[in-house]
Structure formats: structure tokens, C-alpha cells
Amino acid sequence: MKNDKILGVVYALPKSILERLFIIKNPIFVKYLAREITKKSKTKLTKLTDMYFYESDSNKKIIGSGKIIKIESLLISKIPKNYYPNIILDKKELLNYSKNRENKKLALIHLTNIRRFKKVKSLKKALTMAGLYLKPEHLKS
């Protein structure tokens, strides 16, 4: 029987960017989502408290997690300057990531309590760049 409990959301990131998550005190993860988050949206993401980090390079495992404390949806031009030191992409990477999407809102996921797992976790299925709502049955024992 499948368990419908969602543990959190997991996104794949290259190792170089993942390492920044463990260095920045309260990092801000940025992502263009398929559906824009609004006050009226009933997305599962706004109800979650945990985010998991999947290393997309050679490791291909969930290596850590963090607590979601706030989610904002902003145009790149509207991101407050004081956010930039906490965004996991540097300004050049962020501009490159946002190329040709300047008029689309970006999800800014504020995180805290970032931790690296002593024992990494494997997924039973492939993870796309869109991410995954993580359920217990997705994890290998």
C-alpha cells in the first residue's frame, strides 16, 4: 500500500552550488516553477516545511535537507538587494539562469536549519530538474 504522506520537496543541484547551501547561513533557493505561486494558488509547495538536496553530478543521492521558512514569487528585477548575499547563485549565474525569462516570476525559497546527512539517501526513480514531491516509497531502503 502506498503512503500519500509527502516528506518534502527535492531538487537536483550540481555539487558546486550545493556546497554553497552548507556555507550560507540562511540561504535562498531560486527556481522557475511550472506554475507561478500566487496568494490564491493551492500548490503543495506552499504547505511543505522540508526541502531536500539531491546532488545531480556523480553522487546522484540526497545529501541533505533544510527547513522552508518562507516562499516568495518575484520578478528578477524586483529581488531586494539585501537578498543577493543569501541567494545560492551568484549574480552572474542568476542572470544567466533568468535569461529570456525576465518577465516570469521566480520562486525564492528561504531556508534555515540546513544539514548535511551523515548517511546519504538514494531514490528509486530518476529525478528531473522539475523536482519531486518526496514520499517514503521514493526512497530506497
Image (cartoon, grey):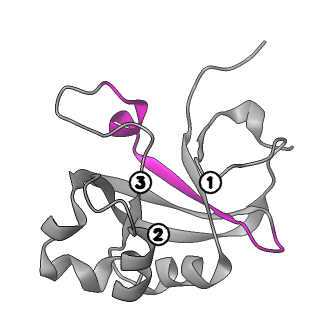
- Horizontally, is 113 left or right of 41 in the view? right
Q: Which residue is mark 2?
A: 114
Instruction: Pick the residue in front: 66 or 133.
Output: 133
Residue shown at 36% from the left, 53% from the top: 68
Q: Residue 6, how many percent across, how many down? A: 55, 31
Q: Considering only order in the chain, which callout, 3 or 1, is on the residue closer to the N terminus?
A: 3
The residue tagged with tag 2: helix, strand or loop?
strand
**Distance from Cα at disc 2 to Cα at disc 3:** 21 Å
* Name of the residue lying farthest toward the front: 100
Instruction: Give the numbered dot on residue 129.
Output: 1
The residue tagged 3 is 32
The CA span between labels 1 and 3 is 10 Å
**Amino acid carrying mark 3 in the image:** Tyr
Q: Which residues are magenta?
A: 42-59
Residue 128 in view: yes
User: Tag 1: residue type?
Assistant: Met
Q: Secondary structure at mark 1?
A: loop
Rendered residue at 31%/56% (across/down) = 106
Determine the residue positioned at 24% across, 51% down: 73
- Which sits in the foreground, 64 or 60? 60
The amino acid type found where label 2 is placed reads Ile
- The question of residue 129 being in magenta is answered with no
